[in-house]
Amino acid sequence: MEKAMEMEAGRQSEVTCVDFWANEFGMRVRIALRELGVAFEYVEEDLRVRERSDLVRRMNPVLRMVPILIHQGRPVCGSVNIVEYIDEVWGEETRLLPANPVDRADARFWADFVDHKVFGAQVRFLESKGEEKDELVEQLKRLEEVLGDKGFFSGHEFGFLDIVTIPFSSMFHGYEQLGRFHLDVECPKLTQWAKRCKQRESVRAVLPDDTKMYELHKQLYGIE
């Protein structure tokens, strides 16, 4: 199901997502909500501003980070944690995590890999102005090995690990421009997977324009 509807910020809502439009971690939350048909209010938190809003300070006083899911007035923090929460609360007809415990554990392992290995390689790639591209390509190829010949990471159905990973495809164009390589050559199965994911309304509605994402990161990392 892909029927979630964003509500105008400021209206009363049972579910609120606090995030920044270009936050790859927060995109997961918004995709998951839309995928399961959960209506939500979206509140933008501009991460380019140093000081966090009062809402963020109140709802996540420990880390003061987004995304934050506010459900019936109570905050849930941490992007992967939030996606699992969404699955547990609203995944009645469609489940995001695999049913088999071993498959669930495997999906969580690779979600952690994305958070630490892929994101870490992306940061170093951007900080080096594209020089450190070998590590990034290596981690993406490792993900491609996990995908294999399947349509999605869990098989034929779009699910948890796809939601965790697909936000990073919004930087594929940036990877190619800065690193001067072609992902469809280096990781052809992964790029085809990204195209399949982007056919889903839940993904299309959330992922930002690739060029806009790259331009933002150029500003953030001082790339000419």
Image: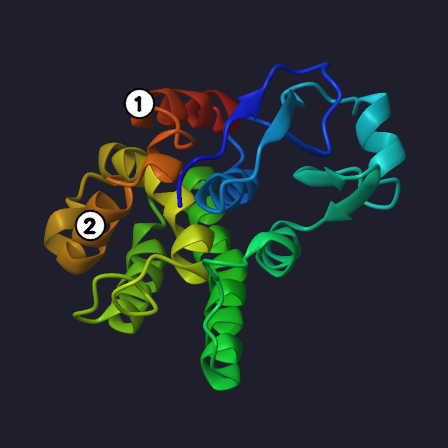
Residue 115 vs residue 194, the one in the foreground: 194
Q: Alpha-carbon neighbours of circle 1 within 10 Å: few (<14), some, or many (≥20)?
A: some
**Image spot of residue 190 (x, y percent):** 22, 56
Q: Which SS class for mark 2?
A: helix
Q: Nearer the viewer, mark 2 or mark 1?
A: 2
Quadrant assignment, res 206: top left
Residue that appears at 49% across and 85% down = 102
Q: Alpha-carbon neighbours of circle 2 within 10 Å: few (<14), some, or many (≥20)?
A: some
Residues marked 2 and 1 touching at CB (< 8 Å): no
- The label on residue 211 is 1
**Image spot of residue 157 (x, y percent):** 31, 62
Q: Which residue is mark 2?
A: 191
Q: Residue furthest left?
A: 185
Residue 160 vs residue 72, the one in the foreground: 72
In the image: residue 64, left or right of residue 167: right
Residue that appears at 27% across and 40% down = 198
Q: Which SS class for mark 1?
A: helix
Name above or below for residue 99 compared with residue 124: below
Q: Amino acid at mark 2?
A: Thr
Q: CA distance from mark 2 to mark 1?
A: 17 Å
The answer to whether any part of residue 113 appears in the image is yes
**Image spot of residue 128 (x, y percent):** 42, 41
Q: Residue furthest front?
A: 93
**Image spot of residue 24 (x, y percent):** 49, 40
The answer to whether any part of residue 224 appears in the image is no
Residue 121 vs residue 93, the one in the foreground: 93
Q: Quadrant of the C terminus?
A: top left
Q: Amino acid at mark 1?
A: Thr
Name above or below for residue 134 compared with residue 4: below
Residue that appears at 60% across and 59% down = 84
Mark closer to the chain start, 2 or 1 = 2
